Amino acid sequence: MPTHSSDSRREILRTAARLFQEKGYDAASMQDIASALDLSKAALYHHFSSKDEILFQIMSYGMDIFETQVLGAIKNIADPEERLKACIQLHVQVVVGGRDREITVILHENHALPEDEMRQINARKKAYIVYLENLIGEVQRKRGGAMAVQPRVAAFALLGMINWMYQWYRPEGRISGPEIARQYTALLLHGLYGK
Amino acid sequence: MPTHSSDSRREILRTAARLFQEKGYDAASMQDIASALDLSKAALYHHFSSKDEILFQIMSYGMDIFETQVLGAIKNIADPEERLKACIQLHVQVVVGGRDREITVILHENHALPEDEMRQINARKKAYIVYLENLIGEVQRKRGGAMAVQPRVAAFALLGMINWMYQWYRPEGRISGPEIARQYTALLLHGLYGK
DNA sequence: AGTGTCCTACCGGACGGTCGGTAGGTATCT
DNA sequence: AGATACCTACCGACCGTCCGGTAGGACACT
């Protein structure tokens, strides 16, 4: 299914991701994508077999970015708490950085894909939740003390507060991304103990 | 613009909300809505002037529900901390209760509406964030102690962890809604202090 | 009681337009 | 010659929307 030049494909995916983010998957037409690239609609079908495939490739690429940029970058940090702190920083940066629209598309387009392909993406999302849950559990165990919050719930809470940022965060706003990440970290780490 | 019988309108809105939630606003057609109600497409236009109007009415009704069910129910609780606890419980319940699909539609369909109507909805959302921010600030002030997290950031964190639940929470899952709300509350309240 | 007027609620069917997708040709490069 | 990368022109399907018409009930006047 892939045609040769990888560069053309990447550029199409980049532009399509931007349009999907701006207008939504359904509202952005193949014509829109073609026009934005100064191409004909048919040219898109030279590189991709369908609109669905474009979306799937965007999402797969987005997951690649996430796993490299976040999980890959922290896997050598030995201390669990430091690893968690770095994870939060990087996750926030990937979501609100504005460079990687693919991430936003993954967050928003949740039932636009055929079931088989959706499952592939969801499996990778789930792996991240499990990773977070284990990491939080590790931090909790190391510090000891009564746990008021289950790692699983804390993981979903963290995921929610970060991912939801794509809905409200604007770079020109009062508080910077890294500062928000720092406060999220404080909220989570203090929240895990006490009482 | 409104036609008389309020009952018919309500039932159309209920069904449309269900379909918008299941398939997304763009992917759910007027034909889908009409078929689900055993009506003709034209009949929908007897009650509503456009698909946009249907969406707007769903969102307005959803905000009504939220403001009644959450804000209205807690406004007589004097103690700020107790008010915040109740707010979290009720907010979670409204999002994952499954009874009010309108809420989910509000959370997901964020650029499907014309700008004017979008602004009306957004103003009500923003009012809630401000309410939350003030409430959290009040709780913080009453307890005293160094504040590691700004009320504004904590408010967005709370909003995120609750609203994001519509993406992953399933009623048949391991942990109940109220229990998650309890743990979110613990996470937030402990997270606000300490250092 | 019968008749004409007006209403809401709905229907079949069609409108212009856009959608995702394709057939077939052309230019370029190896 | 054979790929690759594109083009113009077009397809059938479906979109949101609207038009002309109608069934059936309520009301008033004769």
Image (tube, coloured by chain):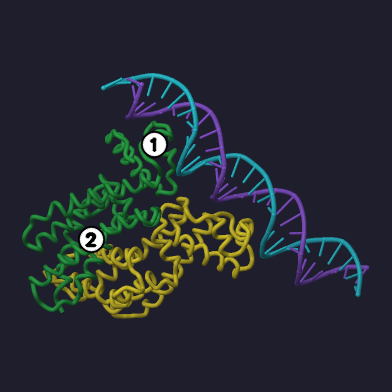
Chain colours: A green, B yellow, C cyan, D purple
Q: Chain of mark 2?
A: A
Query: Label for residue A44?
Result: 1
**Does residue B130 appear anywhere in the picture?**
no
Residue B78: x and y in percent read: 32, 80
Closest to the observer: A42 or A98? A42
Q: Residues within 10 Å of mark 1 (few under 14, many from 20)?
A: many
Residue A68: x and y in percent read 18, 50
Name the kind of residue labelled 2 in the image.
Ala
| Residue A42 at x, y percent in the picture | 43, 34
**Circle 2 residue:** A127
Q: Residue furthest left?
A: A78
Is B41 positioned to the left or the right of A1 in the image? Answer: right
Q: Quick check: A174 above or below A190? A: above
* Residue visible at 22% across and 48% down in the picture: A65
Horizontal side of residue A80 vs A150, given as left or right: left
Say whether residue A191 is left or right of residue B60: left
* Element assignment for label 2: helix
Which circle marks residue A68 in the picture? none
Q: In which quadrant is the C terminus of chain A drawn?
A: bottom left
How many discs appear?
A: 2
Q: Name the quadrant containing residue A74.
A: bottom left
